[in-house]
Amino acid sequence: MFHKILIANRGEIAVRIIRACKEMGIGTVAVYSEADKDAMHTRLADESICIGPAVSTKSYLNIPAIMTAASLTDVSAIHPGYGFLAENAEFAEIVIASGYTWIGPSPKSMRIMGDKVRAKQKMREAGVPLVYGSEGAVRSVEEAKEVAKLAGFPLIIKAAAGGGGRGMKIVHSEPSLPNAFSLCQSEAGIVFGDETVFIEQFLEEPRHIEVQVLGDGHGNLVHLFERECSIQRNNQKVLEEAPSPSISEETRQAICAAGVAAAKAVNYEGAGTIEFLLNPDQSFYFMEMNTRIQVEHPVTEWITGVDLIEWQIRVANGEKLAFTQEDIKMKGHAIECRINAEHPFKFTPSPGKIDLYHAPGGRSVRVDSAVYSGYSIPPHYDSMIAKIITHARDRKKCIRRMQRAIDELAIIGTITTNQELHKRLLANPAFQAGDFNIHFLENWLKQMIH
């Protein structure tokens, strides 16, 4: 097993990885920016090293600084967490070429699934359902118009290198197509350094369902069921749960099988997520793959009993999975609420000092966080304070447990949090009934505001 791992990240995911390493008897190295000198991950790791100033391009995205830290601390592997460099194939190649183990999928798999045009081609070959649209990149407005004639409106134009909800334009009519196409190309070039775009039909009332997969380097690949991720705003998830309350057992089997087929198509190793859009008629279509651990991985861990971070590390170390698909059983229901430092309804960031932090406890309540009383949340990074995760025998009980946990949470200071948003959301009758899609939260917020 690795003697020491460098965690190329910060916040709650860095803390989560450090905890897993400690339980496995593995030494840890935390890297941090000048703004994070008092962060929890720097205190929990065996060693910590500053890699630059607050701005992420000069610290957490600074590959030479991270590699220097790895060399100075004599680590044997690097775990990227999520965000920052986690899906950067060039970084993975540098890590491997430098003689360290990359705790993640192969750079080749990352490049294929990171390019949405190539990914769609691979999925088509693997027989994974796809939304109707262009078979490859669309280079001009004229090509876009030809696709529109066949697919019809509404359409969505997407950046091939996009992600996180960026580089997308929805088009409802032909007159607006040329301007939307040009804007999307321009945004893709500025944000991702690649102007390549493609076009798909726009599904108007889908749900966002993702399948967790896990593979080793010995040909074994399994799914760990699905997660419901439809409660989101501006393509950013707010609450996730597992399993989904919206799909039949037949659809569950089909969508999980499609997730495995998608991962096998690129010889995937490690933990990854296949994301799908699900129509009201239970038809589903491949959207993209996240070639990393997800923020919402704890809900899957709770319903399956599989420690995904531990198995990321074990697989990277060359171990075979210790279980087969038949061994993985689903038990109960789990929900995760993301507690952020932001205005609960305007969603504006709210960095500042936490004078008092009290996390909820009790039966089947898990809190993944990197804050503490006296900690100041810097304005430079993601605003997440904590993830509260509850588990129960069924969804109704799980919601009630989460309501109790949210009520117990106390965060007092100069910051504002979205705690009140979660309270109202959990009490919403439509949410409690499982009657929602990806537009639910935004539509509900508009009604509350007006």
Image: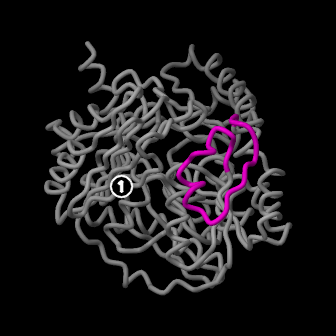
- Quadrant in which the C terminus appears: top left
Quadrant of residue 178 within the rendered picture: top right
- Would you place residue 158 above or below residue 169 in this image? below
The residue under the point 74% across, 62% down is: 107
Asked if the stretch drawn in magenta spans residue 435, the answer is: no
Q: Is residue 271 left or right of residue 53?
A: left
Q: Picture coordinates of residue 273 (x, y %)?
A: 51, 59
- Would you place residue 369 above or below residue 186 in this image? below
Rate crowding at label 1 as few (under 14), some (14 to 19) or many (20 or more) other CA atoms within 10 Å.
some
Quadrant of residue 174 within the rendered picture: top right
The residue under the point 26% across, 32% down is: 420
The residue under the point 45% across, 39% down is: 374
Seen from the viewer's position, the closer of residues 349 and 121 is 349
- Quadrant in which the N terminus appears: bottom right
Q: Picture coordinates of residue 94 (x, y %)?
A: 82, 60
The residue under the point 64% across, 40% down is: 162
Seen from the viewer's position, the closer of residues 172 and 372 is 372
Q: Picture coordinates of residue 433 (x, y %)?
A: 16, 45
The residue to which callout 1 is attached is 367
- Total number of numbered discs in the rendering: 1
Residue extent of the magenta highlight: 32-55
Asked if the stretch drawn in magenta spans residue 42, the answer is: yes
Q: Secondary structure at mark 1?
A: strand
Name the amino acid type tagged 1. Answer: Val
Q: Is residue 41 left or right of residue 72?
A: left
Seen from the viewer's position, the closer of residues 36 and 398 is 36
Q: Picture coordinates of residue 138 (x, y %)?
A: 70, 35
